[in-house]
Image (cartoon, rainbow, N blue to C red):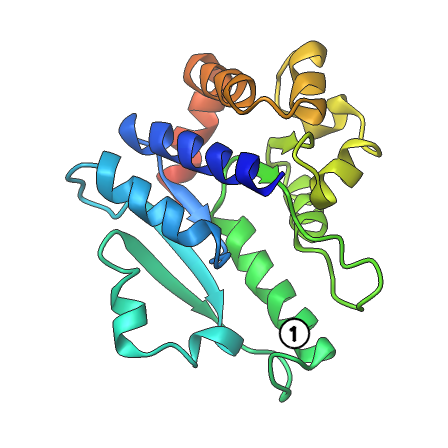
Amino acid sequence: MDRGILEFVALLSGLVFKYGGRIVHGCHPTFTPIILRQARLHAGDRKRKPVILVMSELWAKNLNENEEKSMTDVAEFVVTKQIGSGAVDDIDTRNRSLSTMREVLIGYQNIMVAVGGKLHSDDGKIAGVGEEMELARKKGIPRFLIGGFGGFSRKLASELSPSSLKNELTHEDNMTLLRTDDVAACVHILFKHLSQSESLAKRVSSLDSRAP
């Protein structure tokens, strides 16, 4: 289902940028180039860059100047502290560093959309989608879970009740997002809701004015 996930990310991010929104992203190596390309195509001229990229020092310290420069033309680049003295392959350092990064990531968000995600069922690594969804829940952030494309999001979709997502979608629309692998249907539901919900618009406006 990887192709469906990439199509979803490209289509939704393009619409978000086209209509004035911003995207906060945790530097997933597959998604980041797609999001940056959509920002360059659709964001236009703005006072503030349309993307916030958050990366742990555990990975950022290995970037060269050209790699960082290739991201920051349309993105604010936030580096969070490495926790632990190990390398990337040290499970404890990796987990603790990514948990710190995810706390900062969620702190910038006012709405969360989760799709895909590795299960990490037997390698000792904390599943990012699961941890980020829980952090967003604790902060009362409306969450949208796209489960039909597989990965950890599908696992969560089988466990969570739609009402727990606090996103103001109807039960029927939430169930579609949790189950379908139709990219166009998912994007239509999300974008229509985000563009028409007055309460979500007020939340986004009030939180964005206070964003770091």
Query: Which residue is at a point 26% across and 48% down the rendered structure image?
Result: 49
What residue is rendered at 62% in x and 89% in y? 85
Tag 1 secondary structure: helix
Taking the spot 25% from the left edge, 73% from the top edge, the residue there is 66
Q: Quadrant of the N terminus?
A: top right
Relative image position of residue 212 (x, y in whole percent): 38, 53
> Mark 1 highlights which residue?
94
From this viewpoint, is residue 57 visible? yes
Q: Is residue 106 above or below residue 42?
A: below
Residue furthest to the bottom? 85
Crowd around label 1: few <14 · some 14–19 · many ≥20 (10 Å): many
Rendering coords of residue 199 (x, y %): 50, 18
| Visible residue check, residue 81 | no
| Residue 189 position in % (x across, y down) | 53, 16
Quadrant of residue 102 within the rendered picture: bottom right
- Name the kind of residue labelled 1 in the image: Arg
